[in-house]
Amino acid sequence: MSETTLSTALPPAGRSLGQDAWVRLKRNKAAVASAIVLMLLAFAGIVGPYLAPHPYDRIYPQYVRTPASLEAYPRKDAIAPAFMSALERARVQIGEIAVSGTTVRAPISSDAPLDPRIVRYVDRSDLFSNARLEGLDGKALTAGATSGTIVADVHRLRFLFGTDANGRDLLSRILIGIRISLAIGVLASAMSLLLGVAYGAIAGYLGGRIDNVMMRVVDILYSLPFIFFVILLVVFFGRNFVLIFIAIGCTEWLDMARIVRGQTLTLKRQEYVQAAEALGVPDADIVRRHIIPNALGPVVVFVTLLVPKAILLESLLSFLGLGVQEPLTSLGLLIAEGASNMRGAAWLLIYPAVTLTTMLFALNFLGDGLRDALDPKDR
Amino acid sequence: MIVYVLRRLASAIPTLFIIVTLAFFMIRLAPGGPFSLERPLDPLIMQNLERAYNFDKPLWQQYLIYIGNLLQGDLGPSFTRRDFSVGDLFRTGLPVSIALGSLAMSIALVVGVLLGALAALRQNSWVDYTVVGTATLGITIPTFVIAPLLSLSFGVMMGWLPAGGWGTWQHMVLPVATLALPQIAIVARLTRGATIEALRSNHVRTARAYGLPARVVVGVHALRGAILPVVSYLGPTAAALLTGSVVVETIFGIPGIGRYFVQGALGRDYTLVMGTVVVIACFVIVFNLIVDILYAWLDPRVRYD
């Protein structure tokens, strides 16, 4: 007699919609690379401004349009002449100036006793601080001495991406620009997501005459030029950060409403929804378990493609002078400034342009990757 | 066909009327006026100015006056550019914008269709990948990045072409390139997709089965159908290109009409904004009509009766 053995092994684990999409997304190299780039950019935008060596709105009047360089300013060979010219006004004999690290020192002597107040001549310069007189033995100068050493600390500043036409550090400004551009992109998309999903779902769910009226309203809004709308908003409420993403969100929700409405309309008539209805599943559960997860794919894809669109619109507005206001900045504004300064200061255009292009590329590739991963027709 | 065209043109009149009405009242909603300067004008002067331009009348009366003038082809005086009427501004600016726009359009059409068809014929080869990759690049990079970069590299650094300005044909190269590049990319992508589809369709297979030379199969039978989406894309795009681009005109310093809308709206130059709206609307209507006529000519299945 043969024994029947019951299989005790678990059935192969099913993969959910999300896991499936995740696996496919991970296989797409361009999308993964884009996601990494975006994470780096987001990190740079969120944390960067705190780590940056200069505040984004700090003006260094003596460093206007300094080219991008790895070396710190003032350059080593420029320190001694600057120290010399500052010290000359003290009317003392100046020996050889020695620069070491962040301190500069020079032996000085005079016929009369050295006046300790001469250090002010040095402190007055933007480059030097904490000037002090030392005796030849390295200790503080004794009163009445006619010779000693003047020591001062040098401010050495690094401008990796150079400075702009007002003498602000471009790296810090690009970091804050990334933050603003990404924030506007995300917030505007979130806003259009909220508006569009609510509006589209209501229109699609209620159907009939209400649906008709609601979609006619969308059609009418669609035919109004975006720039007209934004200019009106800007002149009504003035230029500010919140307004800009509201304006962009308000103009971009129309597509979302159409997509969600279309999705809701088709999903309502699907067999599995009807089956759930026949089984007596409550309406709320049908919406939660069947309609939303299935409508989510196209919506998520559309949102990822909406973010670069919103960033682009914000940049265009800033470029036209309708965007965020100085000293705050965005990548579009930086590009506009770079374009007007490109003669003789090309780095002002190139760095922001490269940053924005990278960001847009990554977002577009990620959006395409998500579309391929989430599109159920592709299976 | 002529009846159809006439009917379409007749139906354009109410559309235009609604657009003009909407634009008129929307721009008037904005606070401030063309004469609100940083230093307020003398009240007496202000009064005289307002009387001269009918601003003292109620809004609906101003609207009727504007419509009346518009029907006689008078777009009114410009408020921000004194001594110029809006009509004058368009007479000098429009030819410039049209010249740039039509050149960019033609280049985009020819190069885009060629590249797209080539990519479709050599699908999944290096030609295809290069075209698709470059097209993605062209679509992603915004105009306001391309324009200053072109101006910087060819104008300032290499000095081959003027970085900006207007006058000789050299001045047109960079702006036209800026306008054409993204359009080439989009047209190439559209053509590629449509050609791949057309090559698999029945009528092309039939043409091949007849033993027609490949040149005829592709050039006549496949491309004719494949160009349809390009035509419907290029309609509104042509209207946008011919009425000028604010970015290109700002960066290259071109005296076209693309800047007028934004400048007019910011300076509350009511008549200039209205004029721009009217001109753009006319272009959009005309080009949509042209697209529909081309459609009927390209696709015999489309009939307008």
Image (spheres, helix red, strand yellow):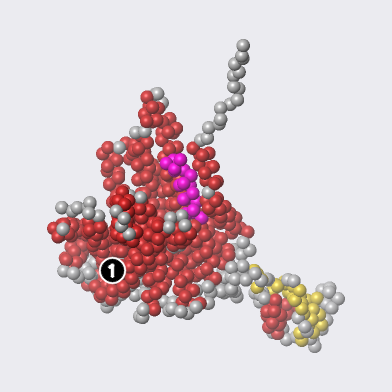
Query: Whole-percent x and y of residue B141?
Result: 45, 62
Position of A368 with respect to B32 (left or right) is right
Q: Nearer the viewer, residue A27 or B279?
A: A27
Residue B118 visible (yes or no):
yes
Q: Residue at x 59, y 68 (%)?
A: A161
Most extreme residue toward the front is B211
Q: Name the subunit of mark 1.
A: B
Q: Position of residue A320 (x, y in %)?
A: 41, 66
Main SS, magenta residues: helix
Q: Which residue is mark 1?
A: B272
Which residue is located at x 53 percent, y 77 percent? Answer: A344
Dividing the picture into quadrants, the one containing residue B238 is: bottom left
Going by the numbered disc 1, the residue's amino acid type is Leu
Magenta extent: A362-379
B66 to the left or right of B113: left
**Residue A243 visible in rendering:** no
Q: Is A238 above or below relative to A153?
A: above
- What residue is shown at x 22% (from left), y 54% (from top)? B300
